Image: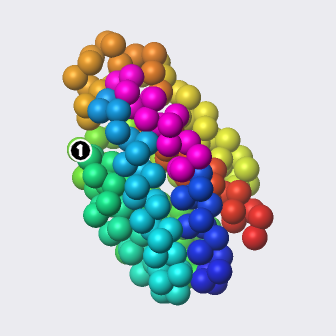
């Protein structure tokens, strides 16, 4: 991946998170700490601020740098979880991955996020979006179809009862609200899919 392409990906993800920060905060206010939108915006703004230096690195190092920056700046539970996602992708991917390599790397990254959060799909977390995205990628679906799968998966967290994170303290009262981490994951997937499809 060329540095200009990765730079574009950073801009696209940071723009998306910034544009939806209030929505993410509102979702998190319903069943969490209420800081998810601001935390995610702070993290992706920090990545954007170092966009040129990060994009100049080989792809594995660039992904690792994004993950490290998110761990350091996002705060809360989201920093380590989203940071782990990017760092695991960096560890697993080569400089020029094909779809099979990307699918395998995402599978490993999901395992790493699951281990870090001590959670699995079905517990109303970002994993409920990552798993369907992995499946869509493995099935050879288009970027647009993968983004649609992510949006649908985030919507599917609404009727779930939260079993992990702050929302789990609410028990049954967590039902009826979308998980903020699932929504931000879907937003990131769409931003990446549209940037890759447009390049």
Q: In this view, does 35 lie above or below 162?
A: below
Residue at image location 35% in from the left, 68% down from the top: 69
Q: What element carries label 1?
A: loop
Residue 106 visible here:
yes
Residue 142 is a magenta residue: no
Q: In this view, does 124 lie above or below 161?
A: below
Residue position for label 1: 118
Give the prevailing secondary structure in the magenta stretch: helix
Boundaries of the magenta span: 17-31
Residue 185 x %, y %: 49, 47
Residue 33 x %, y %: 29, 33
In-image side of 141 versus 22 (left or right): right
Residue 24 is a magenta residue: yes
Image quadrant in which you'd find residue 194: bottom right
Q: Which residue is situated farthest in the right direction here?
A: 198
In-image side of 106 versus 2 (left or right): left
Considering the image in quadrants, where does the N terminus appear? bottom right
Residue 39 x %, y %: 37, 48
Image quadrant in which you'd find residue 72: bottom left
Residue 10 x %, y %: 56, 67
Residue at image location 73% in from the left, 50% down from the top: 144
| Viewer-proximal residue among 162 and 62 | 62
Residue at image location 33% in from the left, 48% down from the top: 78
């Amino acid at each position: 991946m060329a540095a200009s392409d990765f730079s574009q990906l950073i801009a696209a993800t940071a723009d998306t998170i910034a544009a939806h920060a209030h929505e993410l905060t509102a979702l998190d206010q319903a069943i969490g700490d209420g800081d998810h939108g601001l935390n995610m915006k702070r993290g992706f703004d920090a990545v954007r601020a170092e966009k040129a230096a990060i994009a100049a690195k080989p792809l594995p190092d660039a992904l690792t740098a994004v993950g490290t920056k998110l761990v350091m700046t996002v705060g809360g539970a989201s920093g380590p979880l989203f940071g782990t996602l990017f760092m695991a992708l960096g560890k697993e991917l080569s400089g020029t991955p094909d779809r099979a390599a990307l699918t395998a790397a995402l599978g490993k990254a999901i395992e790493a996020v699951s281990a870090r959060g001590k959670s699995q799909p079905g517990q109303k977390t970002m994993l409920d979006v990552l798993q369907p995205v992995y499946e869509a990628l493995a099935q050879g679906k288009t970027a647009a179809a993968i983004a649609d799968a992510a949006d649908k998966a985030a919507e599917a967290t609404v009727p779930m009862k939260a079993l992990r994170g702050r929302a789990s303290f609410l028990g049954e009262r967590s039902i009826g609200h979308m998980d903020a981490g699932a929504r931000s994951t879907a937003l990131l997937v769409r931003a990446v899919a549209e940037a890759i499809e447009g390049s």
